Image (spheres, grey):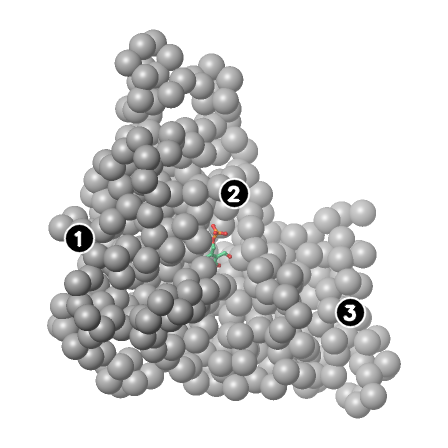
Amino acid sequence: MKRIYLDYNATTPVHIEVFKAMKPYLTEKWGNPSSAHWAGESIKEDIDNARKSIATSLNCNSNEIFFTSCGTESNNWVIKSVVLNSNKKNKHIITTKVEHPAVLETCKFLEKIGIKITYLNVNEHGNLNIEEFENAINEDTILISIMMANNETGVTFPIEKLAEIAAKYNIPFHTDAVQAYGKEIIDLKNLKVDFLSISGHKVYSPKGIGILFIRENNIIEPLIHGGGQEKGLRSGTENVPYIIGLGKSAEIIMENFKNKKSKLIKKIRDRFEKFLFNNLENISINGDINHRLPNTTNICFKNIETSALIKALSIEGIAVSAGSACASHKESFSHVLKAMGKTKMEALSSIRVSLGDYSEESEVLYAAERIVHWVKRLRQFSPEKS
Ligand code: PLP
């Protein structure tokens, strides 16, 4: 059975070039980069070269790139450390209702210790209201954390505009770019954010490596104390093979942008959607179709249960998901679709399909055919046939 993977927002396979780049650091060059003897020799330089590649892919300076263990750690680090650093009596953070749990759960924890959090609303298309955003800023605001692109719907926020407003009020701005990196060009010379999070396993590196971009002149406390690696800001012996892997991912990302890879992915995604709309009734797309990642679609099929559809497709080798991979552990329905005003029924009838570098048009269209087949079939068993 051919396996068709359409869940690249959950994770990506390790690119063969990434694996090849990493391999020597597991076998021959296994030394500790802090060692003064032969085993550690040149490894520090190799790490810095990876840092340079990542910085080039983001158009920032390499001394602004810090390695972490994942996107979740990067988000935790910046949010908690800004709170620790602030000597304001009352502390207030602005975020949105549709962030990843790595931001939302961190904020919920901080609420328990007295930090005030504003969770901004989104409209039915998943968009923010800029006026509501600006009105939420007050004299106690110490940080704004708003994602660049939503993991479930792919909806992108106008980070450039939001960061400019934050700068007007002199408030540090963090963006979770875990889903956007590699799919949209990020130019940090022009995008006035202070902090930005990235995760390796969304861009064809292994799970267990992330980045926090910290713009020069921003003061940040370490979250992890110890031997003083990463200029004393993130201790722990460097995960050398994964850092080298992520450096290679950054090179591949730059090559992909040169070759307009995301345009091709978007074309396949749009054809996939068109096929579904031509062959099924009572379906709709969740999220603003004009402000979306090129690889993602989140579709509501009226009168079916997503869990049954996902299982049926999985048996045939087709992998799609019900929103985020994290959400699949939980009973509750998507907080993103809920914030967009969708009913529980609508949310539980929705699937996320996310394409990636290895998605071929023929297999994506085959998956569309199977989805049409199963939606029709499942609707026959629905109490409200359509
Ligand atoms: N932020 C977003 C938007 C994500 O989609 C994810 C993972 O799905 C994360 C953060 C967490 O990243 P990691 O899995 O590297 O901890």
Q: In this rendered view, identify the residue nearer to me: 378 or 264.
A: 378
Numbered disc 2: secondary structure: loop
C-alpha distance separating marks 1 and 2:
28 Å
Numbered disc 3: secondary structure: helix
Q: Is residue 214 left or right of residue 330?
A: left
Relative image position of residue 161 (x, y in whole percent) = 24, 72
Asked whether the viewer can see residue 370, the reply is: yes
Asked whether the viewer can see residue 52, the reply is: no
Whether ligand 1 has any atom under 8 Å from the Cβ at mark 2 is answered as yes
Mark 3: which amino acid? Ala
Between label 1 and label 2, give the one nearer the viewer. 1
Whether ligand 1 has any atom under 8 Å from the Cβ at mark 1 is answered as no
C-alpha distance separating marks 3 and 1:
48 Å
Q: Earlier in the sequence, mark 2 or mark 3?
A: 2
Q: Is residue 382 left or right of residue 122?
A: right
Residue 69: image tag:
none
Question: Which residue is label 3 attached to?
Answer: 308
C-alpha distance separating marks 2 and 3:
28 Å
Question: Which residue is label 2 attached to?
Answer: 207
Which quadrant holds residue 187?
bottom left
